[in-house]
Image (tube, grey):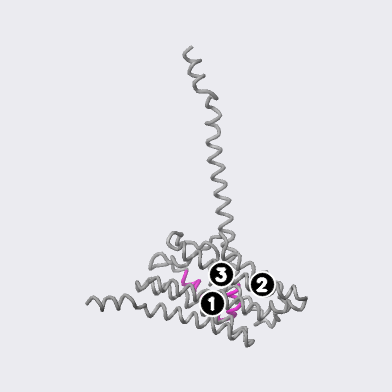
């Protein structure tokens, strides 16, 4: 009885880890496709990895199959699928052409890709160490799947439009660095892990869902890129609006306290002495 129980505890849960492995496979395929020049396929593979990554955590929570092994495995796979794969895709499609401007510009190209990968690793390490204490409704810093999705769908959109990577090399350069920095920033982003909060949602969401499917059928690259950019901007707006509101509330609290301090005598003991006299 004891040995059998020990064997069961030493195993791993199949379903969520199978989905994580699928995300890893998609990320690895993206790297191979990008090296071979199939840039649209490489971008789509990262999007597929993002869908599988979203499913594995939700399936683990629904089936109560969460484990420390799954958390660590998921982070390692995320670093490849949402760190290394999109950075290499950006480099192979566009950033490598910066070498046409000289050796220094060529170094800037692969350094931008490295910055993205490094910040993705730092973001995942911070997330793992603070996951138990963070607010589940928000991410601290842009989540790596969202950053990867925004970067690769931008590339996918330009590829579909027939734009060469060399013509938008500086745009991809700054976007790669910006997304990397946002991953390790203090910007707050809404987390869809806690949504929906109940089994029922407003019926209007069905209309939005149908509209989204229609738009995706028309031009998936443009729609996904727009959603990604919108999500990135939303986090910045929420964070700075929240800080402004906090400063405003803090100023109002100080304003309420100041009149009280002005009415108080400078020396309370001297005031009591005067009253006694």
Could you tell me which residue is drawn at 52 percent across and 82 percent down? 26
Horizontal side, residue 171 vs residue 193: left or right: right
Quarter occupied by the N terminus: bottom left
Label 3 sits on residue: 120
For mark 2, give the secondary structure: helix
Could you tell me which residue is drawn at 53 percent across and 37 percent down? 256
Label 2 sits on residue: 111
Q: Nearer the viewer, mark 3 or mark 2?
A: 2
Residue 98 lies, in percent from the top left, at 73, 76
Which callout, 1 or 3, points at the residue further toward the start of the chain?
1
Residue 262 lies, in percent from the top left, at 56, 29
Check contact, mark 2 vs mark 1: CB within 8 A: no
Label 1 sits on residue: 80
Distance of label 1 from label 3 (alpha carbons):
10 Å
For mark 1, give the secondary structure: helix
For mark 3, give the secondary structure: helix
Which callout, 3 or 2, points at the residue further toward the start of the chain?
2
Query: Can you say whether 266 is above or below 258 in the image?
Result: above
Horizontal side, residue 4 vs residue 146: left or right: left
Residue 90 magenta-highlighted: no
Q: Nearer the viewer, residue 200 or 97?
A: 97
Distance of label 2 from label 1 (alpha carbons):
17 Å
């Amino acid at each position: 009885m004891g040995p059998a129980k020990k064997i069961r505890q030493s195993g791993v849960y199949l379903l969520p880890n199978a989905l994580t492995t699928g995300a890893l496979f998609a990320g690895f395929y993206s790297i191979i496709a990008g090296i071979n020049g199939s840039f649209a396929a490489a971008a789509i593979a990262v999007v597929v990895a993002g869908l599988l990554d979203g499913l594995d955590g939700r399936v683990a929570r629904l089936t109560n199959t969460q484990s420390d092994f799954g958390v660590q495995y998921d982070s390692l796979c995320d670093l490849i699928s949402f760190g290394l794969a999109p950075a290499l895709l950006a480099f192979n499609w566009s950033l490598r052409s910066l070498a046409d401007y000289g050796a220094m510009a060529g170094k800037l190209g692969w350094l931008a890709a490295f910055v993205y990968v490094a910040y993705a690793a730092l973001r995942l390490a911070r997330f793992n160490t603070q996951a138990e204490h963070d607010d589940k409704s928000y991410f601290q810093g842009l989540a790596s799947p969202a950053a990867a999705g925004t970067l690769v769908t931008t590339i996918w959109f330009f590829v579909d439009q027939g734009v060469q990577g060399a013509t938008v090399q500086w745009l991809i350069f700054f976007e790669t660095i910006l997304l990397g920095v946002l991953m390790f920033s203090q910007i707050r982003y809404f987390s869809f892990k806690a949504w929906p909060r109940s089994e029922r949602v407003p019926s209007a969401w069905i209309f939005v869902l149908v509209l989204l499917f229609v738009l995706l059928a028309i031009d998936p690259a443009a729609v996904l890129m727009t959603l990604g950019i919108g999500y990135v901007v939303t986090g910045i707006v929420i964070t700075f609006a929240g800080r402004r509101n906090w400063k405003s509330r803090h100023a109002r609290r100080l304003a309420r306290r100041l009149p009280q301090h002005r009415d108080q005598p400078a020396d309370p003991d001297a005031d009591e002495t005067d009253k006694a006299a």
